[in-house]
Image: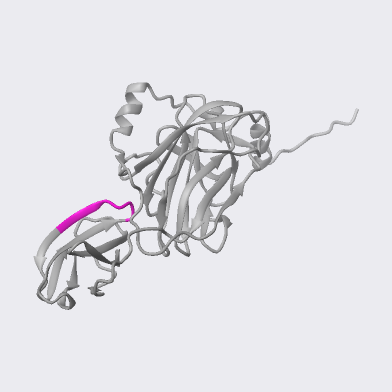
Amino acid sequence: MKKIYTFLTVSTLLFSAAAFGQSDRAKSTTRFTEAQKQEILAQVKSAPTSNTIKVGGGLGSCDSLKVDSVAGNGFHGNMFDIIVATNFTLETFSVSVDAGTWNFAIFYKLGTFLGSETSSAGWIFLDSANVVSTSTTAGVFTKVPVNLNMSMLAGTTYAFYVTGTNSGTPLNYTNGTTVGTVAASNSYFSVTEGNGGEYPFNVINSPRIFNGEVFFCGGISGIEDNNLSTFEVYPNPASQSVSVDLTAFNGEKVVVSVMNTLGQRLQSTAVVANGIQTLNIEGYASGMYFIQVEMNGKTSTSKLSIK
């Protein structure tokens, strides 16, 4: 009898393993205790009650962007980047998760998630809620019932961590090609391929594509600039310090503040507006910020990029 030999490539073996249930969940050997989870999460900052720094204008039309629905793999959650082309307001995400009631948490940080896959330091907790899914198949999305109302500013990269917090959360995601490759995009933003993995902050399987939608509204809502004089901020981008030209305020008493994109007031200084006010921004993370000048209950705001 003639013998038939079958040769399998490495890629074929890997595909076969995945097909027979060797998902990221099945391959994981890490299991955090509750005490370990709390120790990891202790480094996470919390966002303020109002998540936006409101700068001019109202919201435009609202829509959603589907990222992927192929599934084929899964664990607790995904990390991925959103690169903003045009200002918009982030509302929430939907997820692909098996039937049941699962708690989902949403974290973010300025800049890419790369380098922060296994550390909670620098991440900010936005919100969490129970997701009630009746789906028994992949590709059906369930919205996380929160309203983030988060301003997303053009030219900025934001990292997101969307994850189930229950130990058995059966979240679906898809094996990708290269971390950073655009998985979905529109005229407002792009969502890139990221990582998948275990809660909390053990997202080491790469590359993985988020299965779900991003819900958003065009534009950002907020504090109107109440007809105060405009002012110059320089250098911009800045790194160690920034100068604010207050000449236009004619010696009036003003409050000069530095604010981040979540509306947190990082520093405030009450001064008499006589020329140039220098602000120390050493130690601030790279990203988009705002300089706000307040006088007699009215405000004027200017963007500041910190490199």
Q: Quadrant of residue 303?
A: bottom left
Residue 136 in picture, x, y percent from top left: 67, 29
Q: Quadrant of residue 87?
A: bottom left
Residue plotted at (69% across, 40% down) = 12
User: Which percent across, then down, holds residue 169?
Assistant: 52, 28
Rendered location of residue 3, percent (x, y): 85, 31
Q: Which of the 4 image quarters holds residue 280? A: bottom left
Can you say whether 250 is above or below 159 in the image? below
Q: Residue at x 14, y 68 (%)?
A: 278
Q: Position of residue 219 (x, y in %)?
A: 46, 61
Of 267 and 31, nearer the camera is 267
Q: How is the image coloured?
A: one colour
Instruction: Name the quadrant of the N terminus.
Output: top right
- The segment highlighted magenta reads 261-268
Whether 60 is drawn above or below 117: the answer is below
From the viewer's side, name the closer residue of 65 and 294: 294
